[in-house]
Image (cartoon, rainbow, N blue to C red):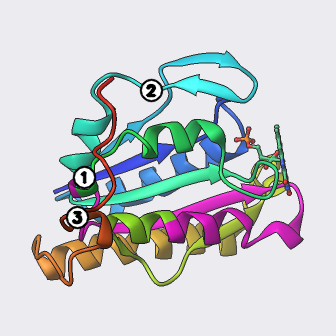
Amino acid sequence: MRLVTIYGSPTPPGKLARALGLLEAGVRDRHPGWEVERISPAEVIDPVTATWPADAVDRVAAADAVVIASPVFRGSITGTLKLLLDTLPVEALRSTPTAVLTVAAAPHHCLAAERHLRDILTWFGALTAPNCAFFVDRVFGAEEVPADVLGELAELADEVVVLAERLGGRSFGPAPLAARRGGPPPAPAA
Ligand SMILES: Cc1cc2nc3c(=O)[nH]c(=O)nc-3n(C[C@H](O)[C@H](O)[C@H](O)COP(=O)(O)O)c2cc1C
């Protein structure tokens, strides 16, 4: 089975990259039946904008489970991540177990990006994992990442791995509004 992680930062490699790397390494260790594949921006244009590889949509659509990772920018997700989400068709994430990982400088912004991502994931009818993970970025600047942080990263990944294994690709209704007749137009072609 395949876990796809989406690295939504336009400024690699930062604290979020370290967090995601630890999560991915944990899945490879604990779940040998799983392949882990990261989708990262292909080209950084400036400190807030980056473009995505041409095959990013197909790779998300082929995932059995997804982890979406974003730093908090201006109290929300990055514009770079939104660029990718805006190119995905509704089927790409529909009923896909999907977890959210966010980091920010300020602890009081713990729900800032998560709540916006949950709204977007509802548009897709994604199977959003009930528990998301948020960390203050400085924990990934330290030489050693605390054990409780590693534990939460493992729990986050295991949520979507277990959901995907138990549900076996099952699709759920009712169809999200975007998938019904008269819904919004498809994503523009690249
Ligand atoms: C343009 C920009 C906007 C940001 N906005 C916020 C914010 O609203 N709240 C916050 O706590 N941190 C904010 N930050 C800090 C980042 O979320 C934090 O430094 C994060 O670790 C950056 O990700 P990276 O380490 O992977 O590059 C912002 C950083 C940038 C560059």
The residue that label 2 is drawn on is 52
Residue 179, numbered circle? 3
Q: Earlier in the sequence, mark 3 or mark 1?
A: 1
Foreground pick, 172 / 145: 172
Foreground pick, 144 / 62: 62
The residue that label 1 is drawn on is 92
**From the viewer's perspective, is 15 left or right of 57?**
right
Question: Label 2, label 1: how many angstroms apart (C-alpha)?
Answer: 16 Å
Number of other residues with Cα within 10 Å of mark 2, as a class: few under 14, some 14 to 19, many 20 or more: some
Place residue 161 in its image quadrant.
bottom left
Q: Earlier in the sequence, mark 2 or mark 1?
A: 2
Question: Label 3, label 1: how many angstroms apart (C-alpha)?
Answer: 11 Å
Q: Which span is picked out in magenta?
A: 91-119
Q: Secondary structure at mark 1?
A: helix
Q: Earlier in the sequence, mark 3 or mark 2?
A: 2
Q: Quadrant of the N terminus?
A: bottom left
Name the spot of residue 40 as percent of width and height, x first: 47, 32
Name the spot of residue 99 as percent of width and height, x first: 45, 67
Disc 2 + disc 1, Cβ < 8 Å: no
Q: Is residue 12 above or below residue 152?
A: above
Q: Secondary structure at mark 2?
A: loop
Name the spot of residue 169 as percent of width and height, x first: 11, 70
**From the viewer's perspective, is 148 left or right of 170?**
right
Foreground pick, 115 / 64: 115
Q: Amino acid at mark 3?
A: Ala
Name the spot of residue 120 as percent of width and height, x first: 48, 63
Q: Amino acid at mark 2?
A: Trp
Residue 7, numbered circle? none
Q: Is residue 18 above or below residue 176?
A: above
